[in-house]
Amino acid sequence: MSTAIRLAENAYATRRWKVPPNVWLLAYSKFRNLSFLPSRHSASVVLSTTRDVLASNGWKGLWRGTEASLIRNVPGVALYMTSLTQLRTWMATSSYFTVVHKRSTTDTTNSSVLPKLTSTGNLLAGASTRVGVGLMLNPFSVLKARYESNMYAYESLSGALVSIIRQGPHELLRGFLASSLRDAPYAGLFVVFYEGIKREASFLAPPTSASHSTAIHSFSAASAGAIATMITQPFDVIKAGLLPHFLFS
């Protein structure tokens, strides 16, 4: 018997869950292996799960946990962007992280006013900011994951938060290491590639209008996100492998 199954049965026996472990493990196994299934089978699993949610909770079930998502994501994005800008501004005062400009364009009207750092500086800034914000908001990440899962007998969002807090600081920080394992390298690499692609694109095709500048920023962000995702996919797989321990224990 695997560790995941033993933990699931213990959680159900002590009534920490309202869903029998065999039901959860069936759903977990389907979604965990979803990316390895043929596309038609994957679509059928998604449709089947959607029908189950609609049958159990109606259309409102698709928006279950919206409050928890807002509590976690809204301050998370605001804190990350603000902290990243402040940290990069502070790092720009150091000659070790400052970019030495070897080329320039004549038109700087539509150029970015954000501080310019070396690739090392951007990597450290993105990764450390993501870890710091993740640590601050990890209790809300736990709240979001458990409230949305429908595996715990939480009747309200406030009740879920009180229940998690009563279990102690360890419970509030559960899953932080697993999340950081993937989020830190992704955030750092994203900033590195975003700044690099934006710099090269602006040099090859200097922005002459606000719309042109917006297009360069959008292209840079999309490209950086795709590259960072492919590089950090192994970390994401490891993070997914730690999911049973995160939920069961």
Image (cartoon, rainbow, N blue to C red):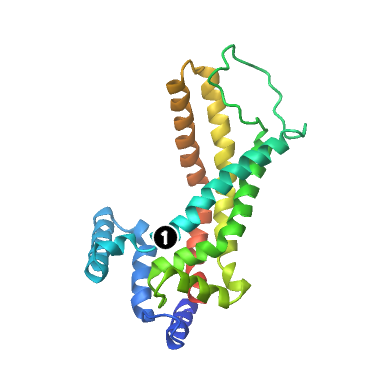
Q: Judge from the rendering whether residue 105 lies leftward or rightward of residue 161; answer left or right.
A: right
Q: Quadrant of residue 35?
A: bottom left
Image position, residue 102 (x, y; %): 68, 18
Image position, residue 209 (x, y; %): 46, 17
Residue situated furthest bottom in the rendering: 13
Q: Residue at x 52, y 48 (%)?
A: 77
Q: Residue 204 versus residue 218: which sits nearer the camera? A: 218
Q: Residue at x 65, y 49 (%)?
A: 128
Residue situated furthest top in the rendering: 106
Amino acid type of the residue tagged 1 in the rendering: Glu
Image position, residue 105 (x, y; %): 59, 14
Q: Judge from the rendering whether residue 105 lies leftward or rightward of residue 216; answer left or right.
A: right
Image position, residue 144 (x, y; %): 46, 63
Q: Residue at x 53, y 55 (%)?
A: 235
Compared to residue 108, the image places residue 92 above or below, namely below
Q: Residue 1 versus residue 214: which sits nearer the camera? A: 214
Compared to residue 43, the image places residue 190 above or below, namely above
Q: Judge from the rendering whether residue 121 lies leftward or rightward of residue 162; answer left or right.
A: right
The residue labelled by disc 1 is 67
Q: Residue at x 63, y 45 (%)?
A: 83
- What secondary structure is marked by label 1? helix
**Quadrant assignment for the N terminus:** bottom left
Label 1 crowd bin: few (<14), some (14–19), many (20+), radius 10 Å: some
Compared to residue 86, the image places residue 128 above or below, namely below
Give the total number of marks visible in the rendering: 1
Q: Residue 218 versus residue 64: which sits nearer the camera? A: 64
